[in-house]
Image (spheres, rainbow, N blue to C red):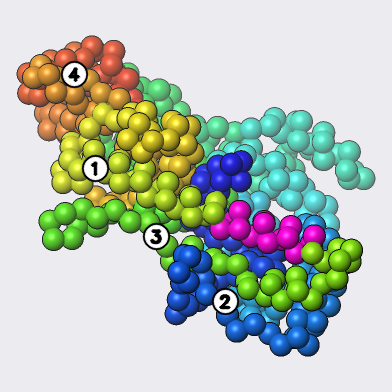
Amino acid sequence: MIQAMQILQLSSLDLAERIEQELTENPFLEVEEASEERSEDGGPNVKDEPEPDGVERMLEELERYERDFGDGTRVRAASSEEGDRKYEAMQNTPDLEQSLAEALLLQIAILELDERQRTIVEYLIWSLDGRGYLTEEREDLALALSGELEEPVSPQEIEATLVQLRAVSHPALGARDLREALLLQLDSRGYGDGLVRALVASHLSDIEGNRLPRIAKATGSSIDEVKDAVDVIRTLDPSPGAEYGEARGAIITPDVLVEEIDGSYVVRLDRERTPALCVSPTYRKMLAQAERGDGVREWVKKRLESARWFIDSVEQRQSTLQRIAESIFRRQEGYLERGVAGLKPLRMQEVADEVGVHISTVSRGVSGKYAQTPRGISPLKFFFTGGTEKDTGEVESQAGVKERIRQIVGEEDPKKPMSDDQIAASLEERDGIRIARRTVTKYRKALGLPSSSQRRAY
């Protein structure tokens, strides 16, 4: 049961890796050929069994396997066919992006640096945070570097080294904070003076709060002049190191496929990555050839039991996930037809009751798994959501309420944006959804929508 629960939690990619591992470690587990017919008892037909001398050779091979690899925790050498498959997989695996430090170390190769300068620049590179900022005080950096070099390092030498680094990378790399990063970029663009530089130097918080009239009054400029200056600032990069990234985004492989066929929605699993497994019939000859007391019988039975349990666990995983997915999309057909607006409130307990399993089984079954639907790819957990009762007695999902808030904000007059109270009133008037202002605020923030004062256009 523990093994079955563990396998149920695996995504299709993780399951494929686990199957590959089991095929490597257990000689009695093999992939069932598509052309292979099933016997009357439901199991695979016994293949042509090897001749006695072939069995003896297999016994010798298995004895050597047991001697070299014991309980299977060590990895045996791959066959040429396995090597080809692994090589192909490696060829098709996306490479990781370079980290910020790794990318910069390659870029400084074009600089003509002596040993001292290279030590300083490499130390500074490894001291950058993920945004490309160097937040430590220059005096502290100089002190730390002085302990690694024969001659002391001054803060001025730190700054000079940063100038060299910026020349081959980003003009704001190594800035102390956002203000300095923006100012460095303005310097590189020739904005040595004027309204744009004044806004960065003294009015960043007002820009963030969209308080343009206050900026205009303080600088003696018109609203249009302030808006033009803000537009220039928006073209600057707030995170000089973000363009490098640590790694590529994870590749999502859906486990569940939902397709519309002849007006009906069909739910199925992606079985291409999950081969059909069977027990190799060679164990029968091996048991017949084995002598009592030589340990072969016990070894064979142990491996045979492990293969059967693994096959049952994989089949149980597929069956459980199929039934859970069917139950989910039977209730969420409105989403398939209308998108997020058609999403209904759904609790895991409802699916567990229909499928006839414990709620923890449903939780494990949907964990880390995705469904490909006519509306796009979404996590299975996305379809479990709470709800709000409407005036009509119907229940609207939280995702549906959020989508309606997004629509209301998108349709508002940008010069007179709606407050959260007004949004709540609009929800009740248009859709019969009655929620408190603080709930609107919570959902708005979750959607990444700014407040009404920040949304206002001048």
Give the extent of the magenta segment.
298-311
Which of disc 4 and disc 2 is earlier in sequence?
Answer: 2
Name the kind of residue labelled 1 in the image: Arg
For marks 3 and 1, give the CA distance: 19 Å
For marks 2 and 3, give the CA distance: 28 Å
Q: Furthest-right residue in view? A: 150
Residue 38 x, y percent position in the rendering = 46, 72
Name the kind of residue labelled 2 in the image: Val
Residue 427 x, y percent position in the rendering = 13, 21
- Asked if marks 3 and 1 touch (Cβ < 8 Å), the reply is no
Q: Secondary structure at mark 1?
A: helix
Q: Depth check: 270 or 113 in front?
A: 270
Which of disc 4 and disc 1 is earlier in sequence?
Answer: 1
Which of disc 1 and disc 3 is earlier in sequence?
Answer: 3
Q: Residues within 10 Å of mark 2 (few under 14, many from 20)?
A: some
Single out the mark in the foreground, 2 or 3. 2
Give the residue pinned by disc 2.
Answer: 46
Task: Answer whether residue 420 is visible to the viewer in this image.
Answer: yes
Q: Residues within 10 Å of mark 4 (few under 14, many from 20)?
A: some
Give the residue pinned by disc 4.
Answer: 389
Give the residue pinned by disc 3.
Answer: 270
Residue 65 x, y percent position in the rendering = 81, 70
Q: Quadrant of residue 97?
A: bottom right
Asked if residue 26 lies in the magenta stretch, the reply is no
Left or right side of 408 for 85: right
Left or right side of 400 for 135: right
Single out the mark in the foreground, 2 or 1. 2
Which of disc 1 and disc 2 is earlier in sequence?
Answer: 2
Give the residue pinned by disc 1.
Answer: 330
Looking at the image, residue 178 lies above or below residue 26? above
